[in-house]
Amino acid sequence: MGKFITANGLKLHYLDHPGPEPALILMPGLTANAHSFDGYIEAGLSPARRVLALDLRGRGLSDKPPTGYSMADHAADIIGFMDALEIEQAFLGGHSFGGLLTIYLGATHPERFPRLVVIDAAASMHPNTMELIKPSVERLGQVLPSWESYLEAMKNLPFYHDWWDPLIENYYRADVAINPDGSVTPQARPEAIIAAAGAVMMENWHQHLAALRQPLLLVNAPGPFGLPGTAPVLPKELALETVNAVADGRYVEVPGNHMTMLFGPGAEKTVAAILSFLNSD
């Protein structure tokens, strides 16, 4: 299912899961790759719908240019991707950073995206979000002695407390390059992630929300992003603020936290909500 296509002057890697049109394009989180949606595929999103999951620029197997990580740059990649595949319209969705990119594209190219799926992202996130996601960002640029040691380090991240799904190992395997000596290095460029995170801060998200006219589904997992008592990345009240700021916004709460929601029961409930939303009038 892994394919490459040239779009907006870059080689982009994507997974093409079969199903009926219109396709649903899914964009991963800040440091993530296309396999972050494997739990949705396992839960039946494909073959119920054609799903195109991408590695955004600077991540996964897609090209990693030294510059060009604004929201406009990312958006141009997605429009170029659709044009290269001769897709005039598609449903659009994304997790975390990909969810914000969904809002941006929905506001700036409304004619291309009739429905939007935003997964645990909003105009305002928890004020300590950067601290909460610090363990995910800190893995970038590190060299670990083996794939096994890397996977063990991932299992010990605080937001996987008392939880693990073997399916997530595909995501982490796609997260790294294996060096000739057997050591591993994460694929995402730290500089790209820092630039992309900075670009988020530059946007007027409330203005983008006010511009949306197409239906938007926001899926929220307000579980603790770490040990019990830790804050969620997106508290329910902030998720509802974004939903209420959209002309046609809809809210669904699912079990888990910002990461675990992508697999297991969280994925099953999310897929049911997405399919109901995409198939509704």
Image (tube, grey):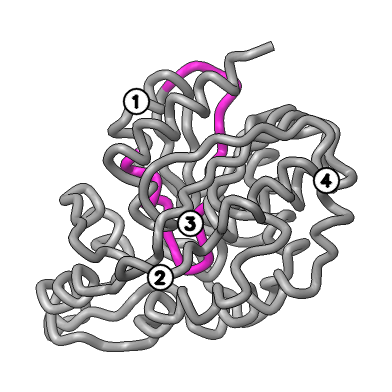
Q: Earlier in the sequence, mark 1 or mark 4?
A: 1
Q: CA distance from mark 1 to mark 4?
A: 29 Å
Q: Earlier in the sequence, mark 1 or mark 2?
A: 1
Q: What residue did someone put label 4 on?
A: 107
Residue at horizontal 35 percent and vertical 32 percent from the top: 268
Secondary-structure class at tag 2: loop
Q: Nearer the viewer, mark 3 or mark 4?
A: 4
Assign the N terminus to one quadrant of the image. Answer: top left
Q: Position of residue 71 (x, y in %)?
A: 73, 63
Q: Do labels 3 and 2 touch, CB within 8 Å?
A: no
Secondary-structure class at tag 4: helix
Residue at horizontal 73 percent and vertical 50 percent from the top: 241
Residue 230, numbered label: 2
Assign the C terminus to one quadrant of the image. Answer: top right
Q: Earlier in the sequence, mark 3 or mark 2?
A: 3
What amino acid type is highlighted by mark number 1?
Gly
Residue 44, numbered label: 1
Depth check, front residue: 148 or 256: 256
Residue 88, numbered label: none
Q: Are there few (<14), some (14-19), or many (20+) residues within 10 Å of tag 3?
A: many
Q: What residue did someone put label 3 on?
A: 55
Q: Are there few (<14), some (14-19), or many (20+) residues within 10 Å of tag 2?
A: few
Left or right: where 236 falls relative to 14? right
Q: Earlier in the sequence, mark 3 or mark 1?
A: 1
Left or right: where 222 falls relative to 116? left
Q: Do labels 3 and 4 touch, CB within 8 Å?
A: no
Q: Which residues are magenta?
A: 19-39
